[in-house]
Amino acid sequence: MIPWLTLAIALPAVGAVVLWALPRTNRAASEATAASATASSAASSGGGTATATAVRPTAAAATGGGASALTAKRLALGFSIATLLVVAAMALRFDTSRAGDLQFQEVHPWIPRFGVSYAVGVDGIALALILMSVVLVPLVILAAWNEHEDREDGGRGYFALILVLEAMMVGVFAATDVFLFYVFFEAMLIPVYFMIGRYGRGDDRARAAVKFLLYSLAGGLVMLVAVIGVYVVGGTFLWSDLVAEGSALAAVDPATARWLFLGFFIAFAIKAPMWPVHTWLPTAAGASRPGTAVLLVGVLDKVGTYGMLRYCLELFPAAVSWFVWPVVALSLVSIIYGAILAIGQNDMMRLVAYTSVSHFGFITMGIFALTAQGQAGAALYMVNHGFATGALFLVVGFLMARHGSGLITDYGGVQKVAPRLAGVFLVTGLAGLALPGLAPFVSEFLVFLGVYAFSPAPAVIAAVGVVLAALYILWMYQRTMNGPTREGLTGLRDLSARETWAVAPLLALILALGVYPQPVLDVINPAVERTAEVGAAGDGATEGAMGAQEEEGDAE
Amino acid sequence: MIPHMDLPVITGTPPRMDWWLLAPLLTVFAAGVLGVLIEAFAPRTRRRGIQIGLAVLTLLAVFVLLVLQVGSLPDGAPGVTVGAGALAVDRTVIFFQGTITVLALVSLLLISERRDGRDAFAAQAATVPGSEEERAHILAGSQHTEVYPLVLFAVLGMLMFPASNDFLTMFIALEVMSLPLYLLCGLARRRRLFSQEAAVKYFLLGAFSSAFFLFGAAMVYGYAGSVNFGDIRVAVEAGGADIFQGGNGEPLLLMGVGLVAVGLLFKVGAVPFHNWKPDVYQGAPTPITALMASCTLVAAFGALLRVFFVPFGGSAESWEPMLWVVAVLTMVVAAVIAVTQRDVKRLLAYSSVVHAGFVLTAVVAGSAEGLAGAMFYLAAYGFTTLGAFAVVTLVRTRDGGQELGDLDRWAGLGRRSPALAGALALFLLAFAGIPLTSGFIGKFAVFEAAVSAGAVPLVVVGVLSSAVTAFFYVRIIVVMFFRDPEGEGPTVVRAGAATGGVIAIGVAATLLLGVYPGALLDTLLPSPEEGSAPTQVMVDQASVERGSE
């Protein structure tokens, strides 16, 4: 039996190591002037003397870096495509009829003393999210192909970080051991931190990276207490044992369950990001390269909502009913607040980030409506949002790569000089506002159905968010693409072949899943039915547990 | 009137000395003495090589002896006591001693590192800083090879400290450990006044805390009628020595516990007894700082764990509230102060204080689980901190002479020396407790023990202060990687084999213990099967002779 998931985790990780291990210079540089050769050899040995390190890499070294950087980029693309193929092959073997169960399971003891295992496995939701992640990575690499030409290392470090992140993204969705999940959940912050802080844009990037890391770390540390609590109460970290009938965790008293739930939820809410702990996202996205933003918003934030679905709901069914209304209320605030702030943004990256705050409100609301439709919609929304927002970030990135600015007011009339770019921008934008026929519409519709069945009022309020979405997307399009072409934009290049290839798959997926979402829903639905059942059964279990306590009280 | 006491009778026949179990300590002692003789008799030019060889061989030999000793421990009992109950030998003690030996060996690499024929120590410590005489000594290439015997004596104290089974032995160990360190702190080659100031501060405060410790031991003697840990434990469980049949000895015990705790908490550097740490860490020669930050911390915690778990284990309710307060203060105060630090060594000093707070949460747990967690934490932290200080020794001012403490001037280090800055970043992430590093597993181990023991609020404080500490670790990474060098940037001197080795060992240990901690956790630490009370893995008898031979 092939360990598919381990392979999918190991492949990009190996790729990253290979990228880092590539010799830093090639022959061109070593044949160059003595000074630059000394500088580069000093750099490669990691030491360096005062005189050698003082010499900035010269043009010769830069061309050397350029050549090896091309190899690095090709390798990165190769590894990410290989990972995609592995995951695709795995997905083809996925048994849809048992999509609610964990498949491709691997369990090996890792730290026996703490009952920690290396345990991976996927159900329908995890599979869909892993697929989405590995589809996005090669496209991001392709889109960022020429972004780092000015750097000393030609962006090689950036691509290595992307591959590290990819390994961790697969791992975090595949983990079926709470400890392992936590390890990936926390460790994946580090590559993103460097991707923003070192390879980001703007003078503010270091601050944005620190803000991102500290927010996430604070949430993660709160979760650590809850993770330890789960172990102390439940006696194991294996997810399947923890949710099994009659596990020690299921019998925990409701007050403890609520605290543990809260510990997990705070971390996931920060990650998601949910109002009022969303403030790191616009800053981080604003300081990110478009590729980083795609992975950050498209994949990393999904870990938050995925965690709510997988861990909060399923581990602590007894506590869920307590949190339904507060979370729905926070989701509503996120939807409206994110949309309103998106309207007011001038920086397109920040704008897209705020639209995501709004969209994540829909996702969390769908999850906590505790109906099968709502959760199916939420799970599908996670996938669709990854593609739609990913495409939007990439297109904004293409614009910025041409003109160097991310501000809406610096553009105008782009449609006349770059019609294809404008067309793609419009389609991805419309996907962002959930136009019928495009993928996000289906998921948003399902969420609305599910939430309405749960309670009409939140659904009605959330509908305001849809109206606002039309406003922020169309207004951005109008200001940047329509009207007279601004000075300095007249020579703007249209999409190159590379750029077209980077967004075309996403557009195809958005259209295909908009018209025919059934394949994804087939995979997601059984898994969601399980979580929805757990939520419903949880209420019963709460009553049961309380009843049992009362009986004990009587007995005393 | 002297009350009757059940002291082991050592006047009739001399106590049986188990030389085999004493061998590691005796080896270090003999090597230290030999080192002093070498100073006296070996020719000046050859002293250095001989001293380094002797020290390295000694520590290697001690390590081998310790490994062999594990096999000679009796089955079924946690261990034995030797020297009429003065020293304990059990798996816990051997783990601490082994850890100290290895860490000392690694520090020795740093201590012996020389650049352009100059090590980190003053050419002639007796000369007035800045004087002509000093210049003459520097030009003549004088050096203090006494450093090596001093380190050996300090290591002797460190090995004895966690093994002590009575308060007098522990006090002697404390002094044997501390006196050479006071001296070594004042020997820095650069910024000598600073270094001497640090030594004086450390000495005065250390002497003060020793007095506290001794006074506390006297109180406990008054209460229990013995200084032996096993006897004290029996007395504590019985409510005091025979004269306290009315049970009115409690205040004496409380005072004793409190005063002894002051002495020990000073050595681990817990708030409010932490004030020496930043000054001493900053002023001392960096290799000595590394030695103190790793070995001394392990030794001090080994002793602290032993004192609270063995003699005072029966009256946990009397010291747990105090340790709660100290742990909370340590984690919160040190983390907050550390945020304002601008000097790398001071920052690492405060970071070491915070880590002491984390380990204290495991002490509060009062269980074998907590003991194991603390042991893992200390070993992991020791290697990481050695690596971090090794990096500090390489980052210098432009002329390559003086270490560059000022953080702001570290800007751009990540561009110039990616490997070095990357290693330091890894150590910092381990300090911050990021998964896949040893720091995370350690933090998990101590927090897990504390949660199991019901100290959830303490753990919540712990994780919150972790978040604060993450802020300043991350800031160092920001400075190194995300900022361009401004003006006179840092100069990185080429890492010698020794320093490079220390960094490599640090990186390897940090990653290995983070990714595959099972090796250490399962084989060397007390396992849950051995029982949940610390005394099930720590010797607590008054005097147990070895086996039945």
Image: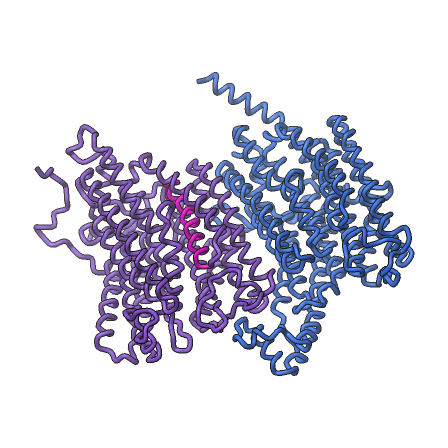
Chain colours: A blue, B purple
- Left or right, B539 with respect to B370, comes to left
Name the spot of residue A57 as percent of width and height, x first.
Answer: 63, 74
Quadrant of the frame with the C terminus of chain A: top left
Spot the residue most to the front: B131
Query: Which residue is nearer to you in this view: A77 or A337?
Result: A337
Residue shown at the point (21%, 53%) measured from the top left: B82
Name the spot of residue A513 as percent of width and height, x first.
Answer: 82, 46
Q: Is residue B391 visible?
A: yes
| The image quarter in which residue B280 lies | bottom left
Name the spot of residue A94 as percent of width and height, x first.
Answer: 71, 48
Residue shown at the point (59%, 23%) measured from the top left: A543
Name the spot of residue B297 as percent of width and height, x first.
Answer: 36, 54
Which residues fall within the magenta stretch?
B344-368
Query: Which residue is nearer to you in this view: B279 or B455?
Result: B279
Query: Which residue is nearer to you in this view: A348 or A290?
Result: A348
- Left or right, B499 with respect to B12, comes to right
Examine the structure image and report whether residue B346 is included in the region drawn in magenta. Answer: yes
Quadrant of the frame with the N terminus of chain A: bottom right
Q: Is residue A21 above or below residue B408?
A: below
